[in-house]
Image: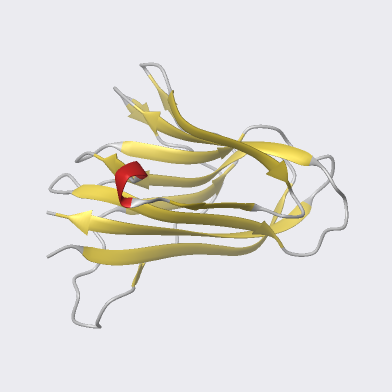
Amino acid sequence: MPRMYSAVFEGVTVSATQDFFEITAPSTGVVRLHEIHITQDDNETSQQLPVRILRVPATVTGGSGGSTPTPRKLGGTTDAAAGAVVKVNNTTPATTSGTLETLRRQGDNVLNGWHWVFTPETRIDVPPSGVVVVRLVTAPSAGIPMSGELLWEEIG
């Protein structure tokens, strides 16, 4: 039976381009992305910043410089621990020996944040051992305290 999980970062000062989230599916299952929400916490400067959701194919070198939060179960306490590995706020982005595939791109005013709620037809599936990142493409003009959440389902 599929299970739902979340990973969160809170109050991180963002002053450079970075991978807000990097999720690696377990080798034995598929990760299906349901929702991504990134918001600024305390900023009054209006600026447009683009964010991309990228598939990282082929040989992947994971990003660094951030942290690895513990995924939280959204279901019952008897659910299994998440098999996916999530990294947040990597200032050195993930790279690949292939070509990054842009799956979604959205440029919004940082005052409004970014919010993707995928319909069943548009949910992004990450294959076993596959990697997807949510990347801030352009650095903000000054450091901005930000928070975010990633919600996903594990199948298999």
Residue 134, percent from left and from top: 50, 42
> How many marks are shown on the rendered structure?
0
Which residue lies at the image location 26% right of the left edge and 62% below the top edge? 82
Residue most extreme to the top: 98
Residue 60 visible (yes or no): yes
Left or right: 141 as drawn, with respect to 64: right
Residue most extreme to the right: 45
Residue 49 vertical placement versus 38 (above, below): above
Q: Quadrant of the C terminus?
A: bottom left
Left or right: 128 as drawn, with respect to 142: left
Which residue lies at the image location 44% right of the left edge and 56% below the top edge? 35
Q: Quadrant of the N terminus?
A: bottom left
Q: Quadrant of residue 77?
A: bottom left
Q: Please name whichever residue, 50 or 136, is drawn nearer the observer in this view of the structure.
A: 50
Which residue lies at the image location 18% right of the left edge and 62% below the top edge? 2
Which residue lies at the image location 34% right of the left edge and 46% below the top edge? 123
Tell me, what colour scheme is on the image?
secondary structure
Residue 109, percent from left and from top: 75, 46
Q: Please name whichever residue, 29 or 97, is drawn nearer the observer in this view of the structure.
A: 29
Residue 70 visible (yes or no): no
Residue 7, percent from left and from top: 44, 62
Residue 107, percent from left and from top: 66, 37
Left or right: 138 as drawn, with respect to 133: right
Residue 56 vertical placement versus 19 (above, below): above
Q: Please name whichever residue, 15 or 147, is drawn nearer the observer in this view of the structure.
A: 147
Q: Quadrant of residue 51?
A: top right
